[in-house]
């Protein structure tokens, strides 16, 4: 076994040591933030499998959205790897089994889900007093906010009602579920960071000095194909135990195993293209009017009457403070 010294040169860098401060609310907590950039998104696989205790799968009581309860398997979180498929292919077909083992497994069983979009952006959180005022002296913190499609759709609704969100204050909370970060999101009546020059300078300086550049890695972890295959095999084995199957024959399925050798040696594995299914930034950046019955799938880019024709340009703010 190799030895290693306590020396800074041996400190792990890159994805294995990627750290960032995340926006998270505690139970019943509220927060006020300002968005100063457009979001980034990545396709990820959220991997879960039955929890095994003493060789048996455990079950728990769960609750539906309507409040009804039922008993189901207690699922462990295995990981959230970035999808190794081609983004253009995923946007077109929903998955890319030729390049991603998790996508391939998703075509064969419901033990693994198809990739989903996960979003991330830097936000600045204000330090507030209990009576909902800025603390004195003023303080704030740059955090990374990661969220799912549901939250993204809620932000689009706010943009439709209040205009572009870059430079906009948002009110979050109260948090009703800390584990799943469920809380209400509303637009602030005013943007506190613009009310005072000192506050503005502090917010901008905090954002510029602490923003995370590589937001894709905040959405999920980068995983080599071999490690993703190992996770998928673990999931298959746990489901075999949960179903009471005694023989561990081909846990990932014969069709899955047959294609893995080619996938592991695919030189184009993990490639991504710039094609996206929609203008993600534009949805949060440009105001829109609600869709009508004549336009069931379109989001209009027309401005609501209460939005100024003078667009907010955060770069102008940065230039003015230099």
Image (cartoon, rainbow, N blue to C red):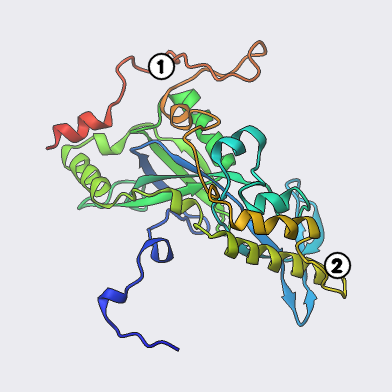
Regarding residue 111, the answer to whether it shows in the image is no
Q: Secondary structure at mark 1?
A: loop
| Residue highlighted by disc 1 | 306
Label 2: few (<14), some (14–19) or many (≥20) C-alpha neighbours in 10 Å: few
Quadrant of the rendered structure where residue 16 is?
A: bottom left
Can residue 65 be seen at all in this image of the molecule?
yes
Q: With 37 as the anchor, is 259 left or right in this view?
A: right
Task: Please state the horizontal and vertical placement of residue 286, each as a whole percent of the image.
Answer: 42, 23
Relative to 99, say whether 36 is above or below. Answer: above
Which residue is identified by label 2? 243
Q: Residue at x 34, y 50 (%)?
A: 212
- Among numbered discs 2 and 1, the one appearing first in the sequence: 2
Question: Is 193 displayed left or right of 69 in the figure?
Answer: left
In the picture as drawn, the residue positioned furthest to the top comes out as 294
Taking depth in this image into account, of 40 and 137 the one nearest to the observer is 40
Q: Is residue 116 left or right of residue 241?
A: left
Compared with residue 256, is residue 51 higher up or lower down, i.e. above or below?
Answer: below
* Mark pair 2, 1: CA separation: 58 Å
Which quadrant, please, contains the N terminus?
bottom left
Residue 45 disc label: none
- Residue 69 is situated, as x and y percent measured from the top left of the image, at 80, 56
Q: Nearer the viewer, mark 2 or mark 1?
A: 2
Q: At 78% across and 53% down in the image, what residue appears?
A: 109
Give x and y (percent) for residue 147: 52, 46
Tell me the quarter of the image containing the C terminus: top left
């Amino acid at each position: 076994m190799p030895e290693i010294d306590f020396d800074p040169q041996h400190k792990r860098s890159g994805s294995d040591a990627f750290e960032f401060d995340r926006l998270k609310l505690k139970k019943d907590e509220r927060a006020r933030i300002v968005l100063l950039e457009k979001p980034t998104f990545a396709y990820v696989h959220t991997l879960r499998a039955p929890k095994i205790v003493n060789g048996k799968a455990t079950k728990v009581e769960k609750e539906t959205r309507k409040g009804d309860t039922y008993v189901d398997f207690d699922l462990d979180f295995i990981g959230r790897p970035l999808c190794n498929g081609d983004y253009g292919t995923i946007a077109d077909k929903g998955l890319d089994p030729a390049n991603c083992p998790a996508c391939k497994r998703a075509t064969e069983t419901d033990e693994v889900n198809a990739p989903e979009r996960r979003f991330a952006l830097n936000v600045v959180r204000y330090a507030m007093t209990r009576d909902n005022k800025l603390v004195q002296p003023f303080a704030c913190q740059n955090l990374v906010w990661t969220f799912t499609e549901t939250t993204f759709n809620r932000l689009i609704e706010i943009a439709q009602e209040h205009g572009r969100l870059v430079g906009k204050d948002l009110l979050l909370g109260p948090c009703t579920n800390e584990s799943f970060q469920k809380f209400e999101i509303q637009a602030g009546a005013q943007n506190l960071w613009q009310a005072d020059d000192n506050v503005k300078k502090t917010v901008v300086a905090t954002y510029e000095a602490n923003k995370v550049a590589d937001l894709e890695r905040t959405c999920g972890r980068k995983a080599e194909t071999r490690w993703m295959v190992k996770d998928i095999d673990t999931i298959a084995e746990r489901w075999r135990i949960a179903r009471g199957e005694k023989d561990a024959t081909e846990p990932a399925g014969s069709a899955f195993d047959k294609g893995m050798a080619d996938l592991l040696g695919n030189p184009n594995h993990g490639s991504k293209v710039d094609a996206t299914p929609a203008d993600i930034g534009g949805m949060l950046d440009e105001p829109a009017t609600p869709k009508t019955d004549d336009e069931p799938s379109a989001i209009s880019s027309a401005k609501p009457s209460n939005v100024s024709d003078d667009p907010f340009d955060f770069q102008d703010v940065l230039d003015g403070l230099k």
